[in-house]
Image (cartoon, helix red, strand yellow):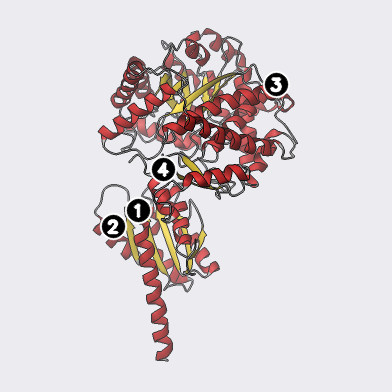
Amino acid sequence: MSLPSERSRLTDIEKYRGQVLSHPLARGIAPNEVREHLASVPRQRFPMVAYANRGPDPCIQPRGGFPLFEAQYQLTQQLSEAGADFIPLTIDSYTRQNEYDTATQLLHRSEEEGKNYLNGYPLVSHGHELTRQLYCDLKKPVSLRHGTPDARLLAEIAIASGIAEIEGGAICYCLPYSEGFPLDRSLLYWQYVDRICAIHSTDDAPINRESFGPLTATLVPPAVVIAVEIIEALLAAEQGVASFAVSFGQTGSILQDIATATVLRELTRYYLQEFGFGSVQNYLVYHQWMGQFPAQRERAAALIACSAVVSSIIGADKIVVKTVDEALGVPRPEINAEACDTVRYVLRTFRSAENVTSPMIESEAALIRSEARSILDAVFNIPGSDFWDSVFQAFHRGFLDVPFAPHADNANKLLSVRDAVGSIRIADAANVPITHEDAQLEKELLESREDRNDKTYRQMLADIRLMV
Amino acid sequence: MASVYQGRVVIGVIGDDIHIVGNRIMQLALEESGFQVFNLRTRIRPEQFCQAALEVNADAVFVSSLNGEGEYWCNDFRGLFHKVGLGHILLYVGGNIVVGKRSRDEVERLFKAFGFDRVYHQEPDIGVAIAQLQEDLRHVAAQRTVKAHGH
C-alpha cells in the first residue's frame, strides 16, 4: 500500500529543472525573476482572490485561443469587457503534443498570410516576455487551457508569463487526449508541473491548479469522474499545491448534476484531510455540456442558459461556458463575448437558493458516494512505490476505466448508458471495483428505460446525441 | 447478447485521427450482431489495416474517418490488398470521410474508385452498414458455392 503522502514530493526538482529550462524556447527563464514578476502582478490575477470576491454567482470563464498575439490581445479585451471573470488562454494542438518546431513554423505562416494555421495560442513559440504584454492592464486571473501530457516547459512559460491557473493533470490530460503517451511518464511530468506551481506560490497568492473532470465527456459515470478528480487533487497536494479546483461536465441529468456536485465537494475535502492536506483550498468548477452540441443556435442558446441555472443550483465556484457556434467550430470573439453576457444574465436573473435536495437526489448521491469510495479505496490498496504508481497500476487492472478514452492503457470495458431521467448508469462495471449491491442498484435503475431491450449500441448512440 | 457468428471484421480509424467514440460504438454494434471484431483503434495507416486483415484472415475491413482524412489515405486502398493476395476482401468506409461539404454521390464515386465496396459518408445509422455487410457476406458465400460446383 502506498498512500498519498508528502514523502513523494519532488524536493530535488532543481536537479533536473535546469534541463527543462535550458530549452532554447524557455528563453532564459530565471525562477528568481519569475518570482519578482509574480509579486508585481495585481492580486486579482490570482484565482484565490477572484474566488473570494465572487459574490453569490459562479465566476464565468469562456474558452479561446488564437495564434497571433494581436488577435489574442483583442480577444482578451473583448472577453473581459463582456464580463468574463477568468480569461482563457487556449493552446494549439501542436504545442500540446510538444511539437514546438511545427507550431513555430505555422505561427510564422499565420503572421505572414494573416490567416490562422493553428487552433490556439502557441505559448511556447511566443515565449513569456511577449505573453506578459497580453495582460499588462488585466485585473482578472488567466487560465491556461490545453490538453498536454508533458506540460513541463509549457507550465514554466505560463507561470513566467504571470498566468496563475494551470488546468490539467496526469490522467485528465493524457487518457482523453492521447492514444499512446505513456501514462506513467504523464504522472511523473505532472508531478513536475504541480511542484513548480507550489514553488511559485505564496500564502496570499497561490498558483491554482484545476483538473479537467469532463474527461471524454461521453457517458462517463460520475463515480469515475469523482475518483479521477480526487486522485489528481491528492497528487497535486503531495507536491505542495495549495489551491486546487475539481471539476465535472454537465451530465445531462439535473438530478445527477446536483448529486455529483454534492459528493465531489464532500469527498474532495474528506480525502485531502484524511491524508494530511486539509490546508489545501478547494473549488468546484462546472463545465457546460461538453458533448455534441445542437447545430441550431436557438437550441444551443437554450442549452447554455439551462446549464447556467444548474451551475447556480449546485453553487459552483466557476462555470466554463460554451457558445452558440459550438457545433460549427472555433467561435468568433463577438460570439464568445455574447455567451459570457448570456450566462451573466441568467445567473443574475435566476439566482438559486443553495442546497436544493430531494429524496431522489439523496439516493443518487448515496449511490455515487458509495461507488466513488469503493473505487478510491481499491486504488489506495494497490501496492506501489508511491501513490502515482498505484494509480498507474489501477488503469492496468481496469479499476479506473474511462469510457471512450482513446488511450491504450485504458481498459475500455466499462459500459454505461442513461436511465429514464437521463442519469448516466453503469450497465457493466467490468473490473471497476464497485460493490455487488451498487452494481445491482445501477441495473435496477436502468430498467426504467423505455428502449431497454433495444441493442446497446443504439441506446448509447441515442445517449451521446442527447442534446442534439 | 450476441447472435450467430457472422465472420471476422477488422476496424479502425485511418490517418492521424483520434476520434474514438464512433469506433467504440462500431465495435459494440458489430459484436452485438455476431461479428468477431479486431479493433485497431485510432491513428491507423492503410498498411496496418492490410497487415491485420492478413493476420486474422478477415472477411471484411471497415475503415472510418471523422476528421475527413479518409480521402488522403485511401487512394488505391484496394491495390494494397491485391498485393498480399486479399484482392477479393470486402472493403467498407464510413464516417466523415472527406474535408468540406461535398455531395454523398460524389464521395461515393470517389471511394468506389479507390476500391471500396460500400461507402457510408455521413450516414447516421450504423445499422444500415451492418445489414449490408451481412448481405454481402451471404453473397460471397453463395459465389464460393457456385465456383466450387463449377469445377
Residue A366 on image: x %, y %: 56, 33
Give left or right: position of A307 versus A43.
left
Residue A61 on image: x %, y %: 41, 22
Residue pointed to by mark 4: A420
Q: Are marks 2 and 1 in contact (CB under 8 Å)?
A: yes
Tags 1 and 3 on a common chain: no
Foreground residue among A156 and A139: A139
Q: Amino acid at mark 2?
A: Val
* Residue A146 in view, yes or no: no
- Sequence order check: which comes first, mark 3 or mark 4? 3
Residue at the image point whose x is 58% and y is 9% from the top: A204
**Local SS, label 2:** helix
Residue pointed to by mark 3: A276
C-alpha span from label 2 to label 3: 60 Å
* Residue A159 in view, yes or no: yes
C-alpha span from label 3 to label 4: 41 Å
Q: Between label 4 and label 2, give the one nearer the viewer.
A: 4
Q: Are marks 4 and 1 in contact (CB under 8 Å)?
A: no
Chain letter behind tag 1: B
Q: Is residue A135 above or below residue A333?
A: above
Foreground residue among B30 and A408: B30
Residue pointed to by mark 1: B97
Chain letter behind tag 4: A
Q: Amino acid at mark 3?
A: Gly
Chain letter behind tag 3: A
Residue pointed to by mark 2: B107
C-alpha span from label 4 to label 1: 34 Å
Q: What is the quadrant of the C terminus of chain A in the image? A: top left
Disc 1: CA contacts within 10 A as few (<14), some (14-19) or many (>=20):
many
Q: Amino acid at mark 1?
A: Ile
C-alpha span from label 4 to label 2: 39 Å
Q: Are marks 3 and 4 in contact (CB under 8 Å)?
A: no
